[in-house]
Amino acid sequence: MIAAPQVSPFTPPRRTLMGPGPSDVYPEVLLAQARPTVGHLDPLFVAMMDELKALLQYAFQTQNEMTMAVSAPGSAGMETCFVNLVEPGDKVIVCRNGVFGERMRQNVVRCRGEAVVLDFDWGKPVDPAVVEAALKEHPDARFLAFVHAETSTGALSDAQTLCRLAREHDCLSIVDAVTSLGGVELRVDDWGIDAIYSGSQKCLSCVPGLSPVSFGPRAVAKLKARGTEVQSWFLDQTLVMGYWSGAGKRAYHHTAPVNALYALHESLRLLANEGLENAWQRHAAMHQELRAGLERLGLEFVVAEAHRLPQLNAVYIPTGVEDAAVRNRLLQNYNLEIGAGLGALAGKAWRIGLMGYGARRENVALCLKAMEEVLR
Amino acid sequence: MIAAPQVSPFTPPRRTLMGPGPSDVYPEVLLAQARPTVGHLDPLFVAMMDELKALLQYAFQTQNEMTMAVSAPGSAGMETCFVNLVEPGDKVIVCRNGVFGERMRQNVVRCRGEAVVLDFDWGKPVDPAVVEAALKEHPDARFLAFVHAETSTGALSDAQTLCRLAREHDCLSIVDAVTSLGGVELRVDDWGIDAIYSGSQKCLSCVPGLSPVSFGPRAVAKLKARGTEVQSWFLDQTLVMGYWSGAGKRAYHHTAPVNALYALHESLRLLANEGLENAWQRHAAMHQELRAGLERLGLEFVVAEAHRLPQLNAVYIPTGVEDAAVRNRLLQNYNLEIGAGLGALAGKAWRIGLMGYGARRENVALCLKAMEEVLR
């Protein structure tokens, strides 16, 4: 026998999470998770799932029937959209203005689709004029894929305009809303978004590990018209919806992450109680306070004001300041986590999150005071 | 705006879970989950992940470096094994003696592998003689895939012999240990298992949503020698291990399900404290008590004694007894969940789980008394 390792219970520190996610989780959500596990086909549990679906529809502002949470993190939500919709040979226009646009391209290639990549500077939004030109140049394109809120840079793109353009050119839109859902205006039905995914651990302030997803009628029609089998069994929406669908008997597909779904239910309930528009307003207001303070410290934003995400503030690291040392001191001395730069911004920027429950005045104050002291 | 639904906090009932999983979760595990969320790159968190890896290696009885937990349920663990190892055109011998063998076949097909299916009666183990003949008949086969403990029937197959045969015929073995890990003898290194996956919600008595996976040296070599890209970005082990590998700096791949990993750490720690062999013995002893009581009630087992899983007891529904009515009365009157039959056994059998924390004398007593009363 290989001997048993001697391990003590893990006691995590109490951090204030102001990175790019996971964000600070609502205390109510942590406790909801600790409620007793029930079976994934228990009638009381499936009734909760019906509520969860309605709460997701509210958060996305959609009446899409195919709205649910993938039993895995946001990257699996992204893959759910691509593997279900993109068939081999399908042409997809992919907008790349950060790490997650590149991840979309990876998904297209792995589905054996054809990716037409439009590159935009990191920190800039997707330019609708460039997208329109590409849609005209590629009349055979089937999809337009872009990131609404680029977590790697803090840039917000105009999802409403981009989805309108997609529709005008007979393309389906696939939208990454991992960081936008709950933090900035997002209206799936009004904007005509065809397929969208998000994550539990950003502006919903739930624990990481789940990915809300919604498919509109045009996406469902594309899925139903497939000539090939979805390459992932686990992410096959047709099978998954046999379990998530409220109509009639639920069919076992995989064992749902019961306790994580308790947590998502609770976080969405708190969002519904606050009201989506109030939550958007709170993120905007906290961003203004943080912005004013960061500028007083002489820090410059990566993204121009008009396209800046309130919930993800990327600022350049001042010349001569050591990236990791600053973040380590914030963590060690203040239990405060801020995010490192990612991809092209690694070592050049910090990412300060104000997401969900984390978008509070006390967090802004802590962050500004701690930054002031470590940068002194 | 679509109006916010009015939803109350969800208060699940306190069930005793004696179905096919999720099993009763250790109270310590539920509480571990409620500990404060930290960042997935926090130095204290990644130190916990190193412990978690050592605990998984202990549970699997392996020194495999590529041992980790997939951030999604067991079905995604299954898919991890197939998408990383099986390339288009690879021939895979799939043993099918229940629902999960069929799911393996689905995975092979979706990876564009060639599945050679060997069928065995439901409730019977995989017959090594049939497998040996197939290995001889298909010298070009690259893999042998089978389920160690069939959750749909309660049959235990001889993984040691099957993996030896695979090796003798130059095949890699892919083993489903979703229900076996922690409940019956399983020795990955001694038995020469090449790739294996399990689930958190069976004999580990953790919350559902994670899938322990381990790849041995031959599987890693096959993965490294691939000529094609892994079709799933989310499950690409080469990328995932950049985050799970203890050596050097951890690279971000996806946001780990932090709180669920606290739970898995705690459940594996409890298993290590008990000792694997003691846990196996406890499952066997509780099974004997349950078996004696079920037989006194006149219930017959689906699986012959020699191949019966202690942790999953499938018994035929007596003639004239209404399946759903009995399960509903157990649930309503005793808060006791037992499992329905699945696939070929739907409506014909019940599945009574004795898994992990659920394999206790008080559960056996409750189950026997409640069954006696509802069957009276």
Image (cartoon, coloured by chain):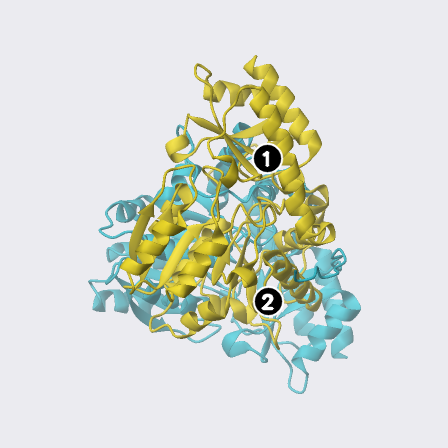
Chain colours: A yellow, B cyan
Farthest residue in the bottom direction? Answer: B320
**Callout 1, which amino acid?**
Val
Q: Is residue B135 above or below residue A352?
A: below
Structural crowding at the residue carrying mark 1, measured as other residues with C-alpha within 10 Å and reported as few (<14), some (14–19) or many (≥20):
many
User: Measured from the top left, where is residue A183 in percent x and y?
Assistant: 60, 45
Residue drawn at 71 percent across, 77 percent down: B326
Looking at the picture, tell me which residue is in the foreground, A321 or B178.
A321
Q: Position of residue B22 (x, y in %)?
A: 61, 58
User: Can residue B15 be spotted in the picture?
Assistant: yes
Res. A63 mark: 2
User: Left or right of A173: which side holds B138?
Assistant: left
Residue B300 position by quadrant: bottom right
Determine the chain carrying the residue at label 2: A
Q: Quadrant of the C terminus of chain B?
A: bottom right
Looking at this view, is A307 or B304 the one in front?
A307
Above-or-below relation of B98 to A356:
below
From the viewer's side, name the closer residue of B71 and A237: A237
Residue beneath label 1, please? B38
Crowding at dot 2, Cα within 10 Å, few <14 / some 14-19 / many 20+, comes out as some
Q: Amino acid at mark 2?
A: Gln
A71 or B371, nearer to the observer: A71
Q: How many marks?
A: 2
Work out which quarter of the rendered image holds the N terminus of chain B and state it: bottom right
Do we see residue B198 in this rendering? Answer: no
State left or right for residue B90 relative to residue A172: left
Disc 2 to disc 1, C-alpha distance: 34 Å
Q: Is residue A374 left or right of residue B329?
A: left
